[in-house]
Image: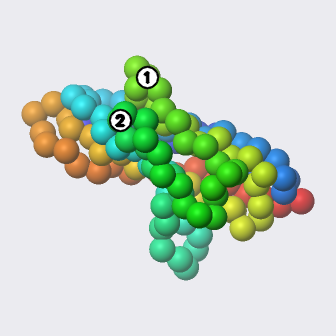
Amino acid sequence: QVQLVESGGGLVQPGGSLRLSCAASGRIFSLDDMAWYRQVPGKSRELVAGITSAGSTTYAEFVKGRFTISRDNANKTVYLQMNTLKPEDTAGYYCNAKVAAYGSGYRFYWGQGTRVTVSS
């Protein structure tokens, strides 16, 4: 089994910063693309940023220039550095990863989410 565990959420003032982490664990044979999504109540989950195993990145327009995604392949961890946070960034942030477990093909896994609240 594979688990994704996020951490780093919390309450921050507008203009502030947070760093989210997501660690993958379990019987992982191969860890491929990883990404961060976010969701607010009543809306669909939306892609924030993604990163391939080779380090290529993609960002949603609404976070370009403010957020940075990175990964540590040795520790099976993906990060999201969030700067210049705005109230509209308030959401549950979810980690997603494409993983091949031992004896299995690739499938996508989700973390349980971490809450980010941007408010004064």
The residue under label 1 is which amino acid type? Answer: Asn
Query: Comparing marks 2 and 1, which lies closer to the viewer?
Result: 2
- Farthest residue to the bottom: give it: 42
Residue 16 is labelled as none
Marks 2/1: CA–CA distance: 13 Å
38 lies left or right of 97 = right
- The quadrant the N terminus occupies is top left
Q: How is the image coloured?
A: rainbow
67 lies left or right of 120 = left
Inspect this view and state whether residue 76 appears. Answer: yes
87 or 54: which is nearer to us? 54
64 lies left or right of 94 = right
* Residue 86: percent from left, percent from top: 77, 61
Q: Residue at x 71, y 43 (%)?
A: 18
Residue 75 is labelled as 1
Q: Residue at x 30, y 39 (%)?
A: 32
Kindly indicate the quadrant of the structure image that contains residue 8. Answer: top right
Q: Is residue 56 above or below residue 49?
A: above
Q: Is residue 36 above or below residue 73?
A: below
* Residue 44: percent from left, percent from top: 48, 74
The residue under label 2 is which amino acid type? Answer: Ser
Q: Is residue 80 above or below residue 46?
A: above
Local packing at callout 1 (Cα closer than 10 Å; few below 14, some 14-19, many 20+) is few
Kindly indicate the quadrant of the structure image that contains residue 117. Answer: bottom right
118 lies left or right of 120 = left
- What is the secondary structure assignment of the residue under circle 2? loop
Residue 53 is labelled as 2
